[in-house]
Amino acid sequence: KYFNRKEGFISSLLGTTKKPIRAVDDVSIELRENEVQGIIGESGCGKSTLLKTVIGLNDPTGGDIVYKGKRLADFSQDDWKEFRKNVQIIFQNPFESLDPKFTVRESLAEPLNIHGIDYSEERIHEALERVQLNPPQKYLDRLPKQLSGGEKQRVSIARAIIVEPDVILADEPVSMLDVSTQAAILRLLSDLTEDLGLSMMYISHDLSTVSDICDQIHVMYLGRVVESAPTNQILDNPMHPYSQALIQAIPIPDPFHDRPRTRLEGSPPSPEELEEGCRFKDRCPDRMPRCDTAPKTVEAEPEQFTACHLHYEESNVQPNADAPVQ
Ligand code: SF4
Ligand code: MG
């Protein structure tokens, strides 16, 4: 209906810049209708910067954010209005979206008001039912302090979906909740994307939570996507040493199927200290001399893109890409 399958409706190409510090560099992600794209990385890897750039709070110094075929840079006032309604964010901390003085009813009425949608009690009830706060009457007059952590996050989600968006950008939406609540909220987000035909970009530092709900995973390291692939493929056969370390770090509950665990040594260098070459080289067990040259992103397996010299073969490189210096 709205979307051009080929173009995707948010694709970000944050390309080269001359600035000395690049929080996000060389990232290309396409989000299509009814798809969930996961972005994974340690804190400080550039996930939040990427999110801010996607919604137009940061101007990219190079590249483009494209929504439904149109660059954000070319948006008119009306385009921005539509975009702000259609692209909703769910934050890590529900307090960022819930005013402590607002009742649940007021919290849900606010986005309707902002986006010029008629208020109706029915709409509010429906949104609360969608996030499984039942019966809605029980919650309408409560303040955030009268809600549990999980209930607050459900109200935040209700605020996002009540304006009938196309896209949800979820920034670590469960990381502040206890483990049992995390699973319930993840299931809810996953069901909502199905039922409402939403697309979601799901940002997290925790690969184990995203693997259940994402169609595709992009692993970020120091502002770069180092590997992108369909979820099952990346879990079964991670190709980049950093993805391998993240996947091996996922705890497995079954003691009979233990697997070797690699610990990631050290911490990422700060962006100011970045040297030439692969950004992961200081922590990489497979480092070799040519890693002093930045690896190019290649399609190492069908639909699996990785930026690592281990998987570099001439045949994988796009015809216009430069060969790396050995
Ligand atoms: Fe490791 Fe080299 Fe691959 Fe970087 S390019 S991840 S240092 S093997
Ligand atoms: Mg963050």
Image (cartoon, helix red, strand yellow):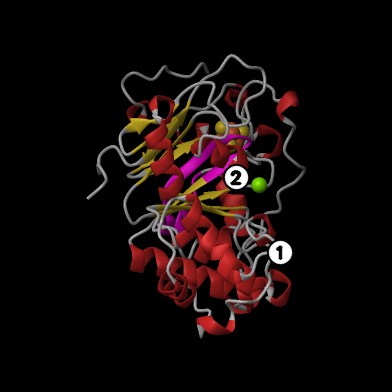
Mark 2 lies within 8 Å of ligand 1 (Cβ measured): yes
| Residue type at tag 2 | Tyr
x and y, in percent, of residue 137 in the image: 53, 83
Q: Which of 118/10 is in front?
A: 118
Q: Which residue is mark 2?
A: 242
Image quadrant of ligand 1?
Answer: top right
Of mark 2 and mark 1, the one earlier in the sequence is 1
Decide if residue 164 is in sight here: yes
Q: Residue at x 63, y 17 (%)?
A: 19
Q: Residue at x 55, y 28 (%)?
A: 25
Residue 291 is tagged as: none
What kind of element bears circle 1? loop
Q: Which residues are magenta?
A: 219-239
Q: Which of 260/223 is in front?
A: 223
Q: Residue at x 56, y 73 (%)?
A: 183
x and y, in percent, of residue 136 in the image: 51, 81
Q: Which residue is mark 1?
A: 101
x and y, in percent, of residue 179 in the image: 66, 73
Residue 94 higher or lower than 60, as above or below: below
| Residue type at tag 1 | Lys
x and y, in percent, of residue 117 in the image: 41, 56
Q: Residue at x 45, y 70 (%)?
A: 127
